[in-house]
Image: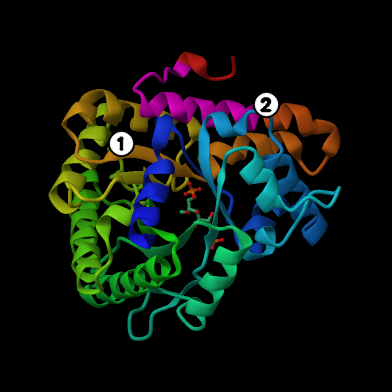
Amino acid sequence: MRRQDLINTARALVADHKGLLAMDESTPTCNKRFAKLGIPQTEEARRSYREMIVTTPGLGESISGAILYDETIHQSKKDGTPFVKVLQDAGIIPGIKVDTGAKDLAGHPGEKITEGLDGLRERLSEYFKMGARFAKWRAVLAIGDGIPSRGCIDANAEMLALYAGLCQEAGLVPIVEPEVLMDGDHTLERCGKVTEEVLRMVFNKLNSQRVMLEGMILKPNMVLPGLNCPKQESVDEVADATVTSLLRAVPAAVPAIAFLSGGQSPELASARLNAMNIRFKSRLPWALAFSFARAIQQPALEIWKGNDANLLPAQQALYHQAKCNRAARQGEYNASMERT
Ligand code: 5MM
């Protein structure tokens, strides 16, 4: 029964060409983004921003699930309606980020390990009772001289697998997010090799922990050249490199791959997802979807700027970015959709 529930939730999260909205920025990350725009870094400002997001008219046309942060899942609209209920009423499945952040990995300068397993079983059970039906855990892997190391990949993959097993036990679909960062001057090819190595290790560990692949979603990076690499490949070349790595490392039993945007502009993230779906969709075992934070939210945040007088244009921008990505899932995105 629970097995079938997990499968159904995983499928529902990518049904009808929709995708996920990551709105799970931790308080420090959210505050950092607010500070850049001169928005007060208060709990009320964060609540108000998240109210703008979840009340966006028509958001459920393109968004199937929203990933919340612990503070946000406990918050409500000004009129007292819990955000979880607002999402459910909009046909959006509530999800929750359950890692507690990436910390320095001992003995591995420049590398991180994601924490959050302590008390996780109890937290997952609470979140399920609150209405969450999926969860998310992000591992962070940097590319540099001699990194990522085998030790870092191994430890992060182990954490992801233990987290995923606990999620399925609690009836929550695990979103498994190993992010290979864009920072650096590495080539597209290097990013492809590292991404493949990381994904292979992640699936080894998921299998060891008996995670049911049909009841999970993978949230990886796209394969990209480092931000400071002099050669920046075309949209089609990125699409080809990304799908090549995924085909080599991701089992066909996984129902969907929902990319993170990782700091790409909304336009590039949509164009690259679109290209993958145009060039490969009919030949892929899994759906190629999105689970973007910045690439959906950033334009809306820059319009809202902490001022509710800007609510409607901000919501229009959010609705628009979500719609562009639903189009990209169908290979129907076009740059001319931007700002229309
Ligand atoms: C990589 O970050 C995830 C996707 O966001 P982008 O599409 O912007 O790359 C996102 O879910 C991420 O995990 C949170 O926004 C940031 O969480 P922390 O814990 O770093 O505040």
From what the image shows, is residue 162 above or below residue 52? below
Quarter of the figure with residue 60: top right
Residue 87 at x, y = what percent? 64, 44
> Left or right of 125: which side holds 143?
left
Question: In the rendered image, which residue does mark 1 sit on?
Answer: 232
> Left or right of 71: which side holds 219?
left
Q: Residue at x 24, y 70 (%)?
A: 210
Check the picture and name the quadrant holding the C terminus: top right
Of badges 2 and 1, the one in the foreground is: 2
Residue 201 at x, y = what percent? 20, 66
> Left or right of 132: which side holds 204?
left
Comparing 97 with 87, the one in front is 87
Q: Identify the amino acid type marked 2.
A: Gln
Residue 222 at x, y = what percent? 32, 44
The answer to whether residue 327 is magenta is yes
Quarter of the figure with residue 54: top right
Q: Magenta span covers which residues?
A: 316-335
Question: In the rendered image, which residue does mark 2 sit on?
Answer: 316
Q: Secondary structure at mark 1?
A: loop
Residue 279 at x, y = what percent? 22, 25
Does the image show residue 292?
Answer: yes
